[in-house]
Image (spheres, grey):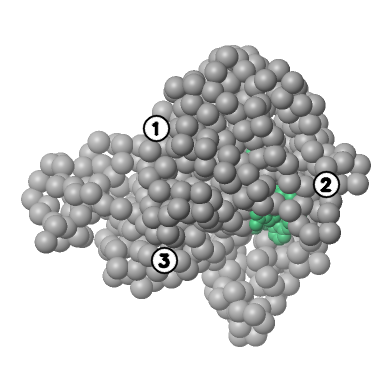
Amino acid sequence: MTIYIPKLPDEAPFSAPQRAWLNGYFAGMMGGDTGETNAAPAVVEEDFPWHDPAFDLDERLALAKDRALPRRLMAAMAQLDCGQCGYLCQSYGEAIASGAEKSLGKCVPGGKETSKALRALMAEAPAVAAPAIKAEAAHPPGRLIAEAVFKGAAPLNGEGSAKDTRHVVFDLSGTGLDYRPGDAFGLYAPIAPELAAAVVAALGADSALAVERDGRRMSLGEMLSTILDIARPGDSVVEAMMKHATAADRDGLAKILDGAADAPLADPDLLDLLLKFPAVRPPLDELLASLEELQPRLYSIASSPRAHQGEVHLTIGVVRYKRNGRARHGVASTFLAERHPPGAGLRCFVQPAHGFRLPDDLSKPVIMIGPGTGIAPFRAFLEERRATKAPGKNWLFFGDQHEACDFIYRDEIEAFQADGTLTRLDLAFSRDGTKRIYVQDRMRDAGAELWAWLNEGAHIYVCGDASRMARDVDAALREIVAAQGGMDEAAAKAFVQKLAADKRYQRDVY
Ligand SMILES: Cc1cc2nc3c(=O)[nH]c(=O)nc-3n(C[C@H](O)[C@H](O)[C@H](O)COP(=O)(O)OP(=O)(O)OC[C@H]3O[C@@H](n4cnc5c(N)ncnc54)[C@H](O)[C@@H]3O)c2cc1C
Ligand SMILES: NC(=O)c1ccc[n+]([C@@H]2O[C@H](COP(=O)([O-])OP(=O)(O)OC[C@H]3O[C@@H](n4cnc5c(N)ncnc54)[C@H](OP(=O)(O)O)[C@@H]3O)[C@@H](O)[C@H]2O)c1
């Protein structure tokens, strides 16, 4: 029998001795021969069938259920390998399993669903002695974090739109940051000061009070708006509150922790919790210690550096909604749209793409599917194809709710058509007709041509919503391959998997 012994990837945030220790630890955990902790364990091929963001959490966990703990933890992540947490999905799972990483709340795209699943997996796992090492800061070594100058967030939607999408520009000159089309841009945005102030008031505290976390001293107000995630408190906050609650309040908090249908709050932020449970006030240091750190947000880069030297452009959908009776504002998207003045700096970094790149061979055709903010990397791709005079054909599928107000970058897209950069454009405005039309409907309409492009060696890219759009587009692609290629379902699935393995089917979904 072959035993797979997991090994930390090179980009995991550990020093060489830590890496050797952890690799030895994994070997021991898997029943392998640890003898030499700094000797590379025998690694055999391992597949990660759950490593697809289009699967639901339950499906991913089911696919990993017979694997070792680090893999089951990996399956609970959002499978984006976006790097927002400072790891990849695999290395974050491994770091948690080893005890080197204590935080279960770092997977921003996975949200509460992921942190809850991680908690459940850790609760049923046999206790492991934490290694005598500490995970380094949540940034892979070598990640350059620099202060870029914000130039503005211009609205892209027209009057009457339900969306508020912004074209965001940062000046990178002098930062040392550079990027390629396909990369993402990470930024550290603070929480709205009103939310931090409301939390301070609910705590009955003084925002000027000096507090400390991990050796960093600052005022309570500053810590609540820049360091701690009060917008997305993890289970540890509810647990800390339960320790200081009466039986009745404990019951309500327990229901929140379980996500019970009759819980007094659904997906609360810290202010919701403090307002709902005015009698529950853990000591401030305990409460602060229970909060997760605020994570950076990532955005697909919407520009080619060849077209906008010294700048990076982003396409950001502003998040605003109502929950538990209060208006909510997405931390980073509203910071850029509403609070950050042009000319001000912001800590940023470039997150290099893990498999979202234009073909090196400029003659290859490219098919891009990016409704909504999913257009972002394709603006960058088209700019790059124009700048490199790539002879390959380019086909874009785009859509959003209404042509009149949501056809973002219309002028630029039409200019790409006019100068021949964009060979073909298929649009799906979902709410202009009597029945919803989506990009995958346009793909099906053009199935024969799409198949012909694939046979010419086209690379196909999908960007945007992971849970619905990317999943349905994937299904449509398999249907087209089956119908046009005369294949049964299994053969079409294998064909699409082969496209992905050959890096001709790449996705940047969130
Ligand atoms: C690799 C990658 C690339 C990305 N690229 C882009 C991009 O190009 N453009 C872009 O706009 N975003 C992109 N995102 C998403 C982006 O990183 C942020 O998640 C997004 O901007 C929201 O961040 P925020 O801080 O404004 O909101 P947050 O404060 O993080 O709030 C968002 C959370 O609010 C909740 N929520 C949102 N809407 C609703 C609703 N209607 N009802 C109830 N709850 C809701 C959800 O729990 C959601 O996770 C990308 C993400 C990844 C991982
Ligand atoms: N994690 C976050 O905080 C965060 C923040 C921003 C965005 N997002 C995600 O990113 C997505 C992108 O948002 P967006 O506003 O740019 O665009 P979007 O909501 O994806 O909408 C773009 C277009 O896609 C359509 N669409 C809806 N369901 C679809 C499906 N199953 N298949 C194909 N198309 C579908 C929409 O139609 P209808 O609207 O008419 O149905 C609309 O025409 C959001 O859906 C959201 O899930 C996440």
Q: Which mark is residue 402?
A: 2
Q: Residue at x 26, y 52 (%)?
A: 46
Task: Looking at this view, name the residue that lies furthest to the right.
Answer: 159
What residue would you read off at disc 3? 61
Is 49 above or below relative to 85? Answer: below
SS of the residue under disc 3: helix
Q: Amino acid at mark 2?
A: His
In this view, the residue in front, 273 or 358, is 358
SS of the residue under disc 2: loop
SS of the residue under disc 1: loop
Q: Which mark is residue 35?
A: none
Q: Residue at x 35, y 54 (%)?
A: 48
Mark nearest the camera among 3 and 2 is 2
Q: Residue at x 77, y 36 (%)?
A: 408
In this view, the residue in front, 483 or 434, is 483
Distance Cα–Cα, label 3 vs label 1: 30 Å
In this view, the residue in front, 195 or 300, is 300
Residue 182 visible in the current orientation = no
